[in-house]
Amino acid sequence: MTKKIKIQKLIEKIEGEAKLKFQFDRDKIDFVDIIFPFSREMRTILKHRPAFDALAINPRVCGICGHAHLIATVKALESCYENIQISQKAHILRDLTLSFELIQNHFKWFYLTLLPLLKEKQDVAKAAAISSMMAKAIAILAGQYPHNSYAVVGGVVCDPTYIEIRQIKSILKEAINFFETAMIINGDTYELTTCEKSDLLFTKKGDLPTVLNKIEKNGWLALGKSYDRFIVFGENGYFKRGKSIKTRIQPHILEKFVEEIPNIKSSAKNVTYKNKFYETGALSRAMLLKTPLIKDSHRRYGDSLFSRILARVCESVKLLHHCLTLLDEIDLSEPSYIEPEQKIQTISAEGVSAVEAARGSLIHKVILKDGLIREYQIITPTQWNLSNGTKEYPGIAQKAMIGLKDIALAEFVFKSFDVCSVCTTQ
C-alpha cells in the first residue's frame, strides 16, 4: 500500500510570499502545489486611467525589477501608435538602464539567495556593493533608482553629457574589477565569456567556483531538470527572441499563443505557449544565443540547477562588456526625445511589448480607448517558470522538484528560478 504524506511550507526570503504544498509518495516528492496567496490588483488600478499614468504606476509593480516594467510599459504604449519615431540614442539608453538592472539583480540573487541556501555566509556587503554601482549608473541617466519614469513615449527625458558617459564607464569597469576579485579571483571576465568548458571553473578560486564545487561535492550537478524547453520574448541589440527545445531553435510570434489560465489555488495565473510550459530566464537566453560555456554545461548536465546558476553569472559578465560597447556607440548629438505626431487622447488600439527582465521574459499588453486604459495585462517571468500544472502535466518548477527526497533541496531548486510573487500577483 502506497503511503501518501502532505506537508506545507512557507517560502521565506523571496520577493513577496509563497507557499509550497508537498505531496510525498513514500520518500519522494510526488507533486507540489505552488501558491501565491495575495494579489494587489494593479490591473484593476490601471483600468480607465489615462494611458500615461501607467508610466508612473507600473514601475511600482515591483521593487526589484521596476525598471523592466517601465520599459515594457513604454514599449507597449508606443506599439499603439501608427507612426512613431525613436532615436537610436534613446534605444541605447533604454537598453543600458535595463541591462544595469539585470546585472544588479543577478549579483544580489547570487549573494543574498544562493549562498545561504548552500549554508554559505550571506554576503550582504558584496551584494550591496554591486547593487550600489548599478543603481548609481541607472540614476545618472534616469534621475533616480528605483521607481523612475525617465522613459516616455517618444524616447527618454535625459540628455547625457560626455562626462556622464565617462562616469558610467568607470562604474562598469569597477563592476568588472569586482567580479575579477570576488566571483573568480585573479580571473579574466573575457575568459568567462569565451570559455567553452564549464568544468574548468571547478579549478578556479572565488565565490562562483566555491558554489559550483559545493554543488558537485553534494552530487547535485544534474539536479532540478525540467522539460528542457526554453523561450525568450524580449529582443534588443543583445537578446534574441525565439524558442528552443533542447538544442533546436525556432522563431516564435509574440502576439499569438500566449495564454493565461486562472488558478483556483493561487492568485497567480498560469501561462503557456501553444499549451506547453516553457522555461524563461538567463538559461533560456543563453541557449538562444548559443553561449559556448552554457551550451557545454547544458550538454553535460542538462537544464539543471548548475546550468541555471552558471547562466545568470555568465550573463552578468557578458552584459557588463556589452554595455561598454553600447556606450561607445551613442551619438550624443541625436535627440533623446521625438514628440509623436498623434495625441494619446485620439488613440484607440491594442499594444503589446516584451522585455527581458532578470528572471526572464516580461510581457505587457494594453487596450486603449480614446487614450484611456480599457484593459492592462502583465505576464511575468515567474508565471512562466512557476505555473501550476497538474500531476499529469506539471509546470516548469513543479517538474524540477518532483522526485526529490528532501524539502530543503526542493526549496533550493524552487529558488533557483528567483521567485517574485509581487510581480506575479500584481
Image: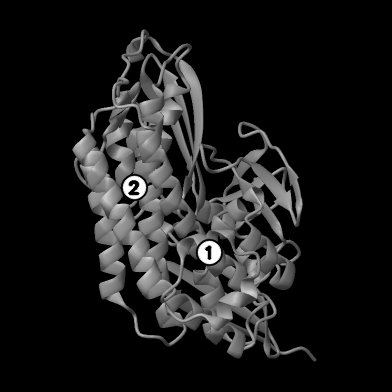
Indicate which disc residue 191 carries. 1
Q: Nearer the viewer, mark 2 or mark 1?
A: 1
Residue located beneath label 2 in the image: 66
Q: Identity of the amino acid at label 1? A: Glu
Residue 130 percent across, percent down from the top left: 30, 63
Query: In the image shown, does 24 or 301 lie closer to the viewer?
Result: 301
367 up-or-down from 417: above or below: above
In which quadrant of the rendered view does residue 206 lie?
Answer: bottom left
In which quadrant of the rendered view does residue 344 lie?
Answer: top left
User: The residue tagged with tag 2: helix, strand or loop?
Assistant: helix
**In this image, 356 relative to 130: left or right?**
right
Residue 312 percent across, percent down from the top left: 50, 62
N-term-proximal mark, 2 vs 1: 2
Q: How many labels, in total?
A: 2
Q: Identity of the amino acid at label 2? A: Gly
User: The residue tagged with tag 1: helix, strand or loop?
Assistant: helix
Distance from the alpha carbon under mark 2 to that under mark 1? 32 Å
Q: Residue at x 66, y 68 (%)?
A: 297
Q: Residue at x 48, y 12 (%)?
A: 82
Query: In the image shown, does 286 or 105 lie closer to the viewer?
Result: 286
Residue 307 percent across, percent down from the top left: 61, 68
Let me know if residue 111 appears in the view: no
